[in-house]
Image: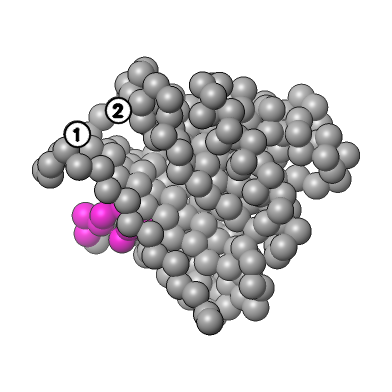
Amino acid sequence: MEIQIAVAKINKYAVSESGDTLEVIERPTGGLSVVLADGQTSGRGAKAVSQLVVRKVIGLIADGVRDGAAARAASDALFADKAGKVTCTLNIASVDLHSKTIVLTRNNPVSMFICRGEQIDSHSEDSISLGTSRNVRPVITELEIESDLTIVIFSDGIVHAGKRRGQPMNAGEAIRSIMEDQDPTPQQLADSLLAHAISLDDNRPADDISVLVLKVSSRTGDEVRRMNVRLPINV
């Protein structure tokens, strides 16, 4: 088997800096963790908040701290820094080769989706953003690594898409439609979800949007690990 990870993200319309921060880190016991944080509001202030959270989390994971404990520590750090006045959502998706599981850690009211073949399950358990108090705990879901497993995680820009027009995006239906019409790669799925959200906002995103897709599939290639990044810039 092999793991494929894809990301598609865009800033809020007319805002130069995204409040969403995403990083990938290798785990000390084998595997990878993807950390996505969305700071409250948007712009430079939100970016500073999400970067603070992500730096804290990836530093602790690199030191061997478990994901849930890293999330709680990041929440405590944010609470101490901002006196509970600023919040941040957090998702961690970890492929842990030591336990041979995928661990999903969520401090985000927005649902995530777990897809196995034609079955698409929404995970929408109550979840509290970081920084609200000193006792914030994440919702943790642990899955066996198995072929034909797809996980879709996103920031709240997806669920806000279309609200200005009275046509809010139904993420679950959008995922189902894309996966029924084709067998998308993780990047195609992430790109399609992002494009649909942008179109619902008349090509002027009402919020920062980040889409993360993690897929387990049968291995068809070699032993080489690869990562591709595309960063459009205006000079």
Horizontal side, residue 73 vs residue 54: left or right: right
Label 2: how many residues lie within 10 Å, few (<14), some (14-19) or many (20+)? many
Determine which residue is flagged by label 2.
145
Residue 55 seen by the camera: yes
Q: Judge whether residue 222 is colored magenta.
A: no
For the image, the number of numbered tags is: 2
Q: Indicate which disc, 1 or 2, sits on the residue closer to the N terminus.
A: 1
Determine which residue is flagged by label 1.
1
Amino acid type indicated by mark 1: Met
Label 1: how many residues lie within 10 Å, few (<14), some (14-19) or many (20+)? few
Taking 136 as reference, is 121 above or below it?
below
Residue at horizontal 55%, vertical 36%? 58
Amino acid type indicated by mark 2: Ile
* Distance in Å between CA atoms under marks 1 and 2: 9 Å
Residue at horizontal 49%, vertical 75%? 233
Along the viewing direction, whichever of 150 and 61 lies nearer the viewer: 61
CB atoms of marks 1 and 2 within 8 Å: yes
Taking 74 as reference, is 232 above or below it?
below
Horizontal side, residue 22 vs residue 151: left or right: right
Q: Judge whether residue 184 is colored magenta.
A: yes
Residue 23 screen position, x and y as percent: 50, 46
Quarter of the picture holding the N terminus: top left
